[in-house]
Image (tube, rainbow, N blue to C red):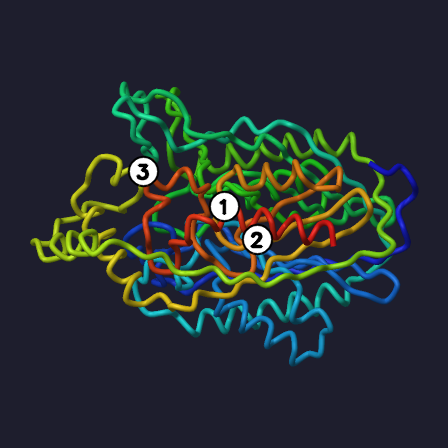
Amino acid sequence: MNTQDSGACRVGFGRRVINPMRGISLAGYFNPRPNTGVLDDLQVKVLLIECTGAVVGLISYDLLIVPLVLVSKVRAALKRSRHPFAETIPLCATHTHTGPDVGEVFDLGPRNEAYLDFAAEQTAAAVADALADLAPAEIAAGSAEDNPFAFNRRYWMRDGTVVTNPGKKNANVVRPEGPVDRRVSVLEFRRDGQIAGLVVNISNHADTTGGDRVSADWPGHLERAVQEHVGGSIQVLTLISPAGNVNHIDVNDPGRPVYGYAESREIGRGYAEIVCRVLGALQPVRCDHPALSVKPLVIGKRTFPAEQLQAARALMREAEAPASGNLTADDLARGDKAVQRFFAQQLVAYVEQMPEAGRRFDCAALKLSRDLAMVFLPGESFAEVGLAIRKASPYPLTFVASLSNGDCGYVAPRECFARGGYEVLPVVGGGPPEDTADRLIATAGELLKG
């Protein structure tokens, strides 16, 4: 990293609570889950950086995704306030599976427009807070190859297929299908000699809490543990590096719990320890001419053989299988009939509802110095995508944030499509074509070189 003094800039932070009303369904599983209360607050967090009169930054939500409809509402709200960054500032999600259903994934019920309007209003208020908070700051950054809580969740089985979440101590597991991104990156902002806020970049699923109560999952615990360590109520924005094929479950450890609030707390606090160790080895970042580049990408619609559709419709005509509890990828791996029927419904709905012309998503790159850049991509890319982008990046430290500016579904490398696993199955709001990973990697490369 560059060891020159940080360039002259001002930094501001803002945040607002975005908890849903009791009863609004939670997102991330294959069935509706009306929430029964709040374990800990969901937040929208804003970071703004002003240098030489230009303002850049990012907005992070404790939500499963940031759907295109929310992107549109937020940009309209910011535009009404005449913010010059209204049309471009990246919007990211932490991917908590205990946040409200915001639509566009699985089509489990009507979209809650009132909640989306509320989230947009809270975003505009948090942006106003961040603008009012702008003050001179010093910037530093660093990283460590230390991510012990992440495991590739797709496994080669003895029959030659790949299964997602095959279960602990499954005798048919041969090996993980793909890699895990071990890097934890940290961006620090100091004002008056004190830490004012952090951005951390970690590859893992935020699906450890489970149940039917609202929680920010491990990113929330991470922030609170960092606050305990450094003192004060500093803001920690977690950017989820591509982790579509990664989660916290070690199939070789039968004793460790899979889900629960205690598990999410342990993982969050574990990540906080790693982040705090990185803080001791950060290098100054000279941020005197930050720039944000945006490139639109149209992601098309997949096609499927007629016999595959016929088989799906036949399964849908069968008597509906009873479901017990929350339905997840674990149930699909066990051959649960209710989940099989669910994905048959999703295939038919995908073919009937997804736009033929595809959907447009904005990819972006925020360049803070000649050594540091951030890339923002839509959807849940596999870890391979983030690793490829970093390897090709001309910036020594490159943050890669997935789940940004809309959701296109899981983005798997093309070789994964024929192997199995639920991530490659078409669902409403997802199901990008086989070339999408290659296109995201190429687009990121263009943004970083431009």
Q: Nearer the viewer, mark 3 or mark 1?
A: 3
Q: Residues within 10 Å of mark 3 (few under 14, many from 20)?
A: some
Assign the C terminus to one quadrant of the image. Answer: bottom right
Q: Which residue is mark 1?
A: 381
Q: In the orientation shown, which residue stands out farthest toward the left?
A: 319
Which residue is drawn at the image coordinates 67% and 71% (left, top)? 86
Tell me, yes or no, whether the two marked residues, 2 and 1, touch with CB atoms within 8 Å.
yes
Which residue is drawn at the image coordinates 71% and 50% (left, top)? 448
Q: Which mark is residue 377?
A: 2
Residue type at tag 3? Gly
Q: Which mark is residue 420?
A: 3
Q: Position of residue 447 (x, y in %)?
A: 68, 54
* Separation (CA) of disc 3 from disc 2: 24 Å
Looking at the rendered structure, the secondary structure element under dot 2 is: loop
> Picture quarter containing residue 165?
top left
Which residue is drawn at the image coordinates 64% and 27% (left, top)? 145
Looking at the rendered structure, the secondary structure element under dot 1 is: strand
Residue type at tag 1? Ser
Residue 380 horizontal side relative to residue 231, left or right: left
